[in-house]
Amino acid sequence: MIALGVRHRNPAGAAVRGMYVRWAIYILIWGILMPSVDNYAHFGGMAAGFVIGYIAETPRAAGPGETLWQAASWFCIILTVVSFLKMWLWFSHLPNIMSL
């Protein structure tokens, strides 16, 4: 959404950009206050999201380019679900620390 606000130089884009930059700063501050949070992962995710959002722009009428972006988005959703499943399976095989 920050990339959308950067790309669209109008009052609506400035409002969107301002709101999401503010939230990014809040999350950054919260991440600094919580020592167990991996801020590098958040920075990487924000940078990758900005680049992809800047390249993808806003959705257009159906066409080959839009179909490609939709396929890429489904691939990313499936990859995220598989990643969480693998993480859950990995954690389920660890010994229960609370019972020690």
Image (spheres, rainbow, N blue to C red):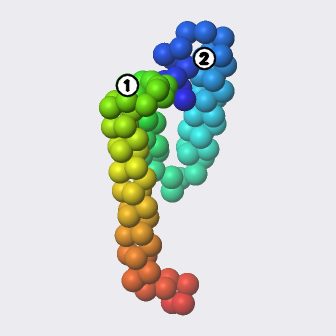
Q: CA gap, disc 1 to disc 2?
A: 16 Å
- Which picture quadrant has residue 78? bottom left
The reply to whether discs 1 and 2 touch (Cβ–Cβ < 8 Å) is no
Quadrant placement of the N terminus? top right
Tell me which residue sits at (46%, 26%) in the image: 61
Viewed as shown, does residue 90 lie left or right of 36?
A: left
Residue 41 lies, in percent from the top left, at 42, 46
Residue at image location 32% in from the left, 32% down from the top: 64
Q: Is residue 25 visible?
A: no
Q: Nearer the viewer, residue 2 or 78?
A: 78
Q: Would residue 23 appear left or right of 6 to someone viewing this image?
A: right
Please state if 16 lies on the left or on the right of 69 as rendered. right
From the viewer's side, name the closer residue of 47 and 7. Answer: 7
Please give the residue where the numbered disc 2 appears in the rendered image. 13
Query: Relative to 91, is 71 above or below?
Result: above
The residue wearing badge 1 is 55
Q: Is residue 16 left or right of residue 83?
A: right
Residue 40: assigned label: none
Compared to residue 99, the image places residue 50 above or below, namely above
Kindly indicate the quadrant of the structure image that contains residue 72: top left
Q: Residues within 10 Å of mark 1 (few under 14, many from 20)?
A: few
In the picture as drawn, the residue positioned furthest to the front comes out as 62
Tag 2: residue type? Gly
Q: Position of residue 99 (x, y in %)?
A: 54, 90
Q: Element under label 1?
A: helix
Residue 56 on image: x %, y %: 40, 28
At label 1, which amino acid type do we have? Ile
- Pointer 2: residues within 10 angstroms few (<14), some, or many (20+)? some
Q: Residue furthest top?
A: 10
Who's the residue at 61% across and 9% down the image?
10
Secondary element at image label 2: helix
The foreground one among 76 and 98 is: 76
